[in-house]
């Protein structure tokens, strides 16, 4: 039947040549390629014993920073959550109480701060949006786990360790 678009191609199935039928030339070509790779520099990296150096633009796990006096920098303004294209960040703000000035830098702080690492695409926009230099993606790799809820990182995993006095 005539093709309407006129773009139809009729494929011919040519009979195989003698060389193609005995497969030997193809097998020898394959072996030659394998043999050539024996003398090439090995590209394999034996992780975790060997580690590839990270680029300067490396984005790892998030950490919530403290100031030079050990107080949490985050003021729960929510800009990181607004900037996040994956909607991975949620938080609950709270008012700093009297006597907590040594814990939180601003009058408002994040009582709850969570990042869903299963949603996060490590774009770094939260880091860029933060006006308080409170969040950085300067941590290590995200490790594998078995349970989905363990990928919701709260303040216990995000806030950096207190300063040593
Ligand atoms: S790195 Fe990107 S996706 Fe991940 S929490 Fe920050 S803004 Fe959201
Ligand atoms: S991490 Fe930065 S942007 Fe996000 S709520 Fe805290 S202060 Fe605001």
Image (spheres, rainbow, N blue to C red):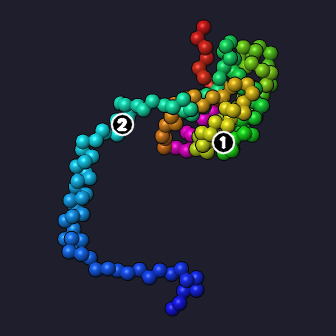
Q: Is any atom of residue 56 visible in this view?
A: yes
Q: Which span of residues is magenta-colored?
A: 147-154
Front position among marks 1 and 2: 2
15 over 98 or under it: above or below: below
User: Which residue position holds label 2?
Assistant: 45
Q: Image quadrant of residue 139?
A: top right
| Residue 68 position within the rendered picture, expressed as x and y whole percent measured from the top left | 67, 13
Q: Nearer the viewer, residue 129 or 21?
A: 21
Answer with left or right where residue 100 lies relative to residue 51: right
Q: Residue at x 31, y 39 (%)?
A: 42
| Residue 81 position within the rendered picture, expressed as x and y whole percent measured from the top left | 72, 38
Check residue 18 for magenta coloring.
no
Q: Nearer the viewer, residue 44 or 76?
A: 44
| Residue 40 position within the rendered picture, expressed as x and y whole percent measured from the top left | 28, 41
In 3D space, how far apart are the residues under numbered discs 1 and 2 (Cα atoms)? Answer: 32 Å
Q: Is any atom of residue 61 visible in this view?
A: no
Q: Residue at x 55, y 44 (%)?
A: 148
- Image mark count: 2
Q: Secondary structure at mark 2?
A: loop
Q: Residue at x 48, y 40 (%)?
A: 144
| Residue 75 position within the rendered picture, expressed as x and y whole percent measured from the top left | 75, 26
Q: Nearer the viewer, residue 66 or 100?
A: 66
Per the rendering, the mark at residue 58 is none
126 over 23 or under it: above or below: above
Q: Is mark 1 within 8 Å of ligand 1?
A: yes
9 over 102 or under it: above or below: below
Q: Is mark 2 within 8 Å of ligand 1?
A: no
2 over 32 or under it: above or below: below
Point out the tag, 1 or 2, that comes first from the N-terminus: 2
Answer with left or right where residue 27 lies relative to residue 133: left
Q: Secondary structure at mark 1?
A: loop
User: Which residue position holds label 1?
Assistant: 88
């Amino acid at each position: 039947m005539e093709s309407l678009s006129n773009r139809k191609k009729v494929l011919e199935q040519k009979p195989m040549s003698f060389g193609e039928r005995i497969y030997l030339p193809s097998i020898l070509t394959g072996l030659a390629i394998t043999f050539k790779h024996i003398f090439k520099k090995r590209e394999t990296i034996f992780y975790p014993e060997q580690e590839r150096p990270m680029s300067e633009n490396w984005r790892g796990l998030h950490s919530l920073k403290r100031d030079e006096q050990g107080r949490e920098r985050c003021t729960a303004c929510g800009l990181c959550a607004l900037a996040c294209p994956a909607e991975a960040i949620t938080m609950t703000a709270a008012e700093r109480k009297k006597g907590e000035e040594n814990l939180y830098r601003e009058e408002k702080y994040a009582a709850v701060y969570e990042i869903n690492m299963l949603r996060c695409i490590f774009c770094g926009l939260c880091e860029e949006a933060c006006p308080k230099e409170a969040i950085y993606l300067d941590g290590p790799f995200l490790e594998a786990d078995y349970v989905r809820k363990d990928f919701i990182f709260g303040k216990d995993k995000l806030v950096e360790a207190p300063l040593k006095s």
